[in-house]
Image (tube, rainbow, N blue to C red):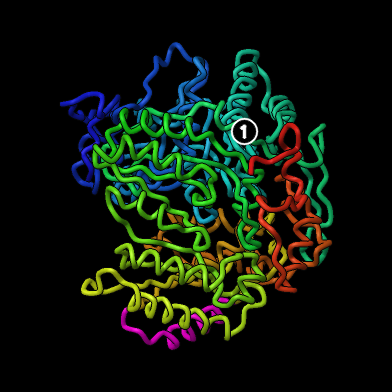
Amino acid sequence: MQNKTPASKPGYFFKISVISMDKRLERILPKVQKPARYTGGEYNQILKDKSAVDLRVAFCFPDTYEIGMSNLGMKILYHTMNSLPYVWCERVFAPWSDMYEQMKTNDIPLYALESGDSLDAFDVIAFSVGYEMAYTTVLDMLDMASLPVRSRDRESLLPLVFAGGSAGVNPEPMAPFMDLFVIGEGEEMNNELLALLRKAKLEGWSKQRFLEQAAGIGGVYVPSLYDISYHDDGTVSEIRACSGAPERVTKRIVKDLDSVPFPVNPIVPSTEVVQDRVNLEIFRGCVRGCRFCQAGYIYRPIRAKKPETLIRQGIETLKNTGYEDLTLLSLSSSDYRHLGQVCDGLLEFCEPRSIGVSLPSLRADNFSMELMEKLQRVRKSGLTFAVEGGSQRLRDAINKNVTEEDLLNTCRIAFEGGWNTVKLYYMLGLPTETDEDIVGIASMADQVLHCWRQYAKYKNRGVRITISTSCFIPKPHSPFQWEGQISPEEYLRRVNLLRSSITARNVVYNWHDAETSLIEAVLSRGDRKVADVIEAVWRKGGRLEAWSDFFSYDRWMSSFAEFGLDPAFYARRTRPSDEILPWDMINVGVRKQHLVHEREMAYRAALSPDCRHACSACGAASLLEGGKCDE
């Protein structure tokens, strides 16, 4: 683990303290792995006087401490909610199985790290949900707080239970459990919602009155104010808004990233976490238009920070935390126009202090020797490229816009510069994929290996080429939202075809399991009826199912059967473009006609230009003043 002594406080030592926790907790902590997950007391945590605030927020991440503390969005929103003087926002994470069993055995409720208070002491239970497989953990955390999991069974205004995050762009599978959803970016929206809740609490409003008023805040979706009707075949026949709720809820965005607060003094974890470094967001959105990529559409329009803002925020955060690594984050970091200027400004501070700077989301078509030299000044890491498709025809169909020549030229530059580790990511099951495309992945690996043999600077070190595949999952608000997913059996057939096609000893192949991908597809494209299945899985012991240790395919399938629902109806069925989709009440800013057009282009294997070269008129720019993206 890195020495994260804050650079501005030489000689500072961390003191882990258990805040307001009873003797039961102190007795069980020595019995669990990584007890620092559960103690709080970290450097830069925010403590407030409970008697001096009007609202207490339990900010819940439905996964372990290591995952939640690596989430940049959670760090930002923790900071912005705590910027309100009348709010104290505290963190809550899901315990690992050993701690979970100890808490159950000793009758210890789920508690917040800052105060140690159980969740029944809070006015707001807010969940950040970025992954559908966390849904059962959300229910489990509510139950550990002794709260009914269904919104209808929580009759009083407080505690208000709501959720946000990228999984909320189809809120319907979790709609019966949440009082409301916040759709889009929460820096401003969350605080507007909390201001209204403070007023409602002080004036004694009913829950119904509050929800009807909250529905008037841009980006707030209140499921109980929408009636959903179904055809006999199970498809949605009508979505009807009630009580003055908007017909469609338009996501909220932050229009100017330079103007909103960014936590330059984030909490420094007391134990190692997944992203144990400074994460610096450089822009939101993506100039590319990959047709499978939900994130590329739901985070539009493009908004970038100024280079001077990034340099200042990066240096201040490093000084305030003592981290030895900094990562520049975005959906496609090498597309940032001022990347060289930012790297130079940061490295001027980082290089003398042996602080590494890295870019996790590189593009094979714009990797340069100049950029490579900047990245390896302090330390060298492996290179990872998402190629996605095994042939140029398939890459054109998904609008990946990366050629074989691009990839091999990038590998040549890297190998000449001393790199000897390359990871290539692909998807199997993309629309229009053929066996020839799959065999093409193995052929590409052979060509990368040949490139290393030709150009490697250090041949004596050997080379390691890793191919990873996952199963394509059709996601809401993307051009492929209407497509069907291949069956688990077909996915495994394609995996075996690729395995048998890889012959080089230097090539390692890893693949994601098909069963989890099927369930994720169901939850991604499900409707409110799926909520019964989620609850049934949870009641049968489902929790932390984003982890293979806890995932049970049989538990999910038996729960689908219990309610007479067919997972293939949600995951594998190709939907007509005029079908009413369960998430059609959510507007992420991209016109449905644009998604239909892009889907048609895919079947012609035709490319669409990226945002820097021509505006595709997707509609997202309308969310900005002046209607123009920052390209």
Q: Nearer the viewer, residue 528 or 417?
A: 417
Q: Main secondary structure of the magenta part?
A: helix
User: In the picture provided, is 576 more to the left or to the right than 85?
Assistant: right
Residue that sits furthest to the top in the current view: 52
Q: Nearer the viewer, residue 219 or 147?
A: 219
Q: Position of residue 59 (x, y in %)?
A: 47, 34
User: In the picture provided, is 319 more to the left or to the right than 225?
Assistant: left
In the image, what residue occupies the spot 47% across and 47% down? Answer: 140
Residue that sits furthest to the left in the current view: 11
Q: Nearer the viewer, residue 328 or 171?
A: 328
Q: Which residue is mark 1?
A: 254
In the image, what residue occupies the spot 42% across and 73% down? Answer: 467
Three-letter residue code for mark 1: Val
In the image, what residue occupies the spot 60% across and 50% down? Answer: 286
Asked if residue 504 lies in the magenta stretch, the reply is: yes
Asked if residue 595 lies in the magenta stretch, the reply is: no
Q: Quadrant of the N terminus?
A: top left
Q: Quadrant of the C terminus?
A: top right
In the image, what residue occupies the spot 54% across and 78% down? Answer: 491
Q: Is residue 158 above or below residue 369?
A: above
Residue 340, can we see it? yes
Q: Position of residue 573 (x, y in %)?
A: 70, 71
Figure quadrant of residue 269: top left
Q: Position of residue 238 (x, y in %)?
A: 83, 52
Q: Is residue 355 above or below residue 286?
A: above
Question: Which segment is the magenta one?
Answer: 487-506
Q: Secondary structure at mark 1?
A: loop
